[in-house]
């Protein structure tokens, strides 16, 4: 599995993210080519700069967009063109020749941003002008981020804790504390910290990319580093470079044809919970990406019967899953243990049968198929549809595979 790791030790901004990812793609010019497919963006409005440079002894890429400045004598149409509404941006992206997935992700990102701005300003998303973040450079930053993610074939994204900076920042609404209100709102529920000399280290666009792209937060995951790069911002800081580091990794190595990976076992002992309530907790965990959930019968102090509730998680999901266990159970704490797991290669295929389509889990070892197992829910659906037992349906399906 390809994994993109964002090392936000010095924060994150749109230009930093794009600069960093440009180190990873075979042809950086693809960004300019794809941005050119947004036909509603006048090429005279902007100039894209991709510059290999060195900052604080680090080599990386400085990505920048220089936009045509609007002057006080410009007419109302030009001012409207500079401060775009959400509907304007949606129309621009919908009418472009970008891929359908990039279009969908860009529109989703701007909708999230509009909701954040509306929350901060006490209005509705359709009335948001976007101010700085709706200017040409930020449209290119957000669209460019998803363009490069597609160029990398949409890897899973993990992220470090995010450095938001400190001090104040000057924006369209005056001097505000760092993180700026929209940035802070976008980062709700995400792990942050503040380090370094006072400055805005995470911008609204940077926070938006973390919100929309990141699958989980962790230290660098186990795996092989395939490529890496630094993307530089436009601010200067003496104590740490204004830079984002990204790592592209192959996670999940192989041992004797088996996949080797790290997983987290979360468990807790419970003796005062209604047994019916475990179902909802299990459903919450599976929906949130748990690998497996189960219970074990145990005896606790004073020989009271109890239940050990267990959950297997990917490392980046462990904290989220522990929070769900504490919220939806009666436990006061959760024990986490890191485990090494060896597992087989498997994939789910859709198979056409005389009874209808059914999903089948195919398990392999060293390229050889070990077994094919029909998905239970599909078997159940076909059994109900044809009014026969599960045993009969399973026998008929297996005879056709």
Image: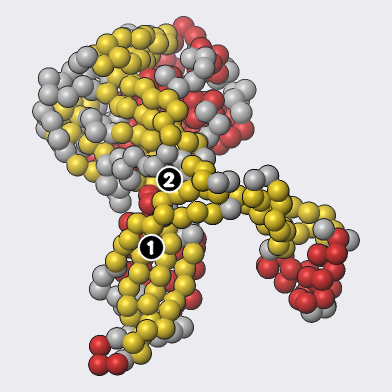
Quarter of image, res 141: top left
- 335 left or right, relative to 154: left
The residue depicted at 35 percent of the width and 15 percent of the height is 61
Under circle 1, the secondary element is strand
- 213 left or right, relative to 357: left
Query: Whole-Å distance between the Cαs marked 2 and 1?
Result: 19 Å
Under circle 2, the secondary element is loop
Q: Which mark is residue 206?
A: none
Quarter of image, res 326: bottom left
Query: Can the viewer see residue 41?
Result: no
The residue depicted at 29 percent of the width and 66 percent of the height is 335
Which residue is at the far top?
Answer: 44
Residue 129's x, y, as percent? 37, 31
Query: Can the viewer see residue 216?
Result: yes
Residue 177's x, y, as percent? 15, 36
Q: Nearer the viewer, residue 308 or 192?
A: 308
Total marks shown come to: 2
Which residue carries the number 2 mark? 215
Which residue carries the number 1 mark? 265
Task: Indicate whether 218 appears above or below 98.
Answer: below
Q: Nearer the viewer, residue 333 or 119?
A: 333
Task: Indicate whether 89 appears above or below 78.
Answer: below
Q: Nearer the viewer, residue 141 or 219?
A: 219
Task: Indicate whether 55 appears above or below 397.
Answer: above
The residue depicted at 34 percent of the width and 46 percent of the height is 217
Between marks 2 and 1 in the image, the one whose residue lies nearer the viewer = 1
The 10 Å Cα crowd at callout 2, few under 14, some 14 to 19, many 20 or more, is few
The 10 Å Cα crowd at callout 1, few under 14, some 14 to 19, many 20 or more, is many
The residue depicted at 43 percent of the width and 34 percent of the height is 224
Q: Quadrant of the C terminus?
A: bottom right
């Amino acid at each position: 599995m390809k994994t993109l790791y964002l090392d936000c030790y010095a924060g994150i901004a749109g230009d930093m993210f794009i600069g960093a990812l440009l180190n990873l793609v075979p042809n950086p010019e693809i960004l300019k080519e794809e941005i050119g497919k947004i036909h509603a963006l006048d090429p005279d409005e902007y100039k894209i700069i991709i510059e290999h440079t060195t900052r604080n002894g680090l080599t990386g890429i400085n990505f920048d967009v220089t936009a045509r400045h609007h002057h006080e004598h410009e007419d109302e149409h030009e001012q409207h063109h500079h401060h775009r509404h959400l509907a304007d941006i949606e129309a621009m992206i919908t009418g472009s020749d970008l891929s359908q997935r990039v279009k969908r992700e860009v529109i989703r990102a701007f909708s999230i941003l509009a909701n954040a701005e509306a929350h901060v300003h006490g209005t509705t998303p359709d009335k948001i002008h976007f101010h700085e973040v709706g200017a040409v450079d930020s449209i290119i930053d957000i669209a460019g981020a998803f363009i490069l993610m597609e160029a990398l074939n949409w890897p899973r994204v993990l992220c470090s804790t995010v450095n938001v900076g400190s001090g104040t920042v000057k924006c369209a609404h005056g001097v505000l504390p760092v993180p700026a209100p929209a940035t802070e709102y976008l980062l709700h529920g995400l792990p942050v910290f503040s380090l370094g000399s006072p400055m805005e280290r995470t911008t609204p666009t940077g926070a938006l990319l973390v919100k929309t792209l990141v699958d989980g937060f962790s230290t660098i995951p186990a795996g092989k580093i395939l490529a890496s790069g630094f993307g530089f911002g436009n601010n200067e800081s003496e104590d740490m470079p204004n830079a984002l580091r990204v790592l592209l990794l192959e996670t999940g190595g192989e041992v004797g044809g088996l996949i080797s990976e790290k997983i987290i076992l979360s468990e807790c002992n419970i003796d005062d919970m209604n047994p019916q309530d475990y179902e909802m907790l299990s459903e919450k965990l599976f929906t949130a990406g748990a690998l497996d959930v189960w219970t074990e019968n145990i005896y606790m102090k004073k020989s009271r019967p109890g239940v050990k509730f267990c959950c297997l998680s990917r490392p980046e999901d462990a904290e989220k899953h522990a929070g769900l266990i504490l919220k939806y159970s009666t436990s006061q704490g959760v024990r986490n243990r890191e485990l090494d797991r060896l597992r087989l290669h498997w994939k789910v295929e859709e198979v056409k049968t005389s009874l209808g389509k059914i999903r089948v889990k195919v398990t392999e070892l060293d390229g050889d198929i070990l077994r094919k197992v029909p998905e239970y829910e599909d078997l159940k659906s076909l059994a109900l549809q044809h009014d026969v037992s599960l045993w009969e349906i399973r026998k008929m399906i297996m005879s056709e595979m």
